[in-house]
Image: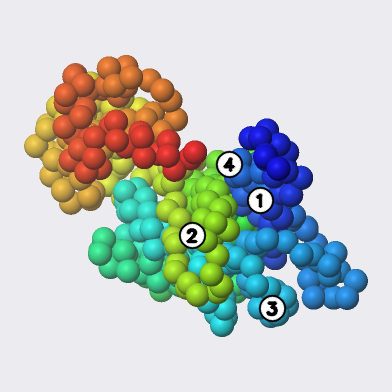
Amino acid sequence: MVFHHSDLQKVLMLKPKHILLLLEWYDYRIHKGVAQMARKYGWQLDCPKNQSNISSKSGILKDWDGDGCIAMIQCDKTFEYLSNKHIPLIDLGLMDHEIAIPRMITDNEKIGKLAVEHLREFGHKEIFVIDHGKNMMFQERLKSLQKFARINSCKVTILKSSSEIQNEIINELESILEKRGQKLRESSLGFFAYNDVIAADLISLCLRKDIRVPENIAILGVDNDDLIISSLILGLSSVDSDQEGLGRSSARLMHKLLANYKGHTSEEVFRHAPKGVVTRRSTNCYAVRNPLVSNALHWIQNNFYKGIQATDVAAAMGVTQQGLQKAFAKSYIRSPGNEIRNQRLESVAFLLQTTNANLETIAKNCGFYSVNSLINSFRKKYDTTPGKFRELNKKANS
């Protein structure tokens, strides 16, 4: 009997691969990313929302008999259920277990690095963090935060009064500052929340206590969760961990495993890189005590795209260029000229990621006098060309 190509397609369509997505900590973005690739590969994707009954006799997974499983293994029930399955498995979690399977997890070291660099750029030399104990995600991000804080001459202070966002946190902050002869409502603090839920709760607490965000406390979250961010009256700056992209990456890995499955033999760890920091109001304020430098930074932020130079900044502030340079050297991490260039390049990077505008248009809109000037400056900061930068970001989002 001879099969035609169309007949083979029909046979394959009748027997799709059944893939199970188990997310004990449900994240709709991971689900969405996996679902996108499931459609591409022709899978039937099963993702039960209530996964508390995984190993129960009456659970909906009791008779599940599929071809592969992508899971966030965070408890013994999931481990028990999966350990007896002789199918390709991918773990999205950090829990220690004895199954030799690959992991696809967020690159928490890069998240810590981005967080430190972001808060440092806004002048914060100390970063406050709430202690969340043995939570593995928190511990990985804290370890990275401390590592890159040392590299960037920053200090990390861990608040231990409560793991919840309650009045005790504010009381502990006030106690720390009082010992230094400072007051919270006259300070400018940098705060890292290891996810957007914590960050949103902290913003809400600050608003109830009449503590200004970001002027008194600049708050940076992680995940760039649009549901959380859209619920806040004040824009939350966040490290975009690209959970949707992580879902797509895990599905691509599953596609490879399905084609060449030889049992649970690989413990390779794949780390999915975050997209970067999305800056909104909650951190968009420079922690600089020198009013001249603070005003100059805000003026640069509002005028960098006009082709300004350091002399224009000095004139706008009513001081000499030498006086401005000295003030920046004492109070900030960059000179006025370097700050102008940095603002322009960050704007270029944003436009490359979010628009299809050509380099001539981007150069004009970001204050560069020529495309060549843009390319040369961009290569020095990002160690790649604008074209390759845009191409890499498109691949990461596809």
Residue bearing the label numbered 1: 31
Extreme-left residue of the structure = 322
Residue bearing the label numbered 4: 234
Nearest to the observer: residue 135 or residue 211: 135
Q: Could you classify mark 1 by the number of other residues whose Cα lies within 10 Å: few (under 14), some (14-19), or many (20 or more)?
A: many
Contact, mark 3 vs mark 2 (Cβ under 8 Å)? no
* Element assignment for label 3: loop
User: Label 1 to label 2, Cα distance in Å?
Assistant: 15 Å
- Above or below residue 338? Residue 96 is below
Q: Mark on residue 106? A: 2
User: Label 4 to label 2, Cα distance in Å?
Assistant: 27 Å
**Which mark's residue is nearer the viewer, 3 or 4?**
3
Q: What residue do we see at 65% from left, 63% from top? A: 69
Earlier-in-chain disc, 3 versus 4: 3
**Which mark's residue is nearer the viewer, 3 or 1?**
3
User: Label 4 to label 1, Cα distance in Å?
Assistant: 28 Å
User: Label 3 to label 4, Cα distance in Å?
Assistant: 48 Å
- Above or below residue 312? Residue 341 is below
Nearest to the observer: residue 112 or residue 170: 112
Q: Could you classify mark 3 by the number of other residues whose Cα lies within 10 Å: few (under 14), some (14-19), or many (20 or more)?
A: few
Contact, mark 4 vs mark 1 (Cβ under 8 Å)? no
Residue bearing the label numbered 3: 84
Q: What residue do we see at 27% from left, 17% from top? A: 360
Earlier-in-chain disc, 1 versus 2: 1
Which kind of residue does numbered mark 1 sit on? His
**Which mark's residue is nearer the viewer, 4 or 1?**
1
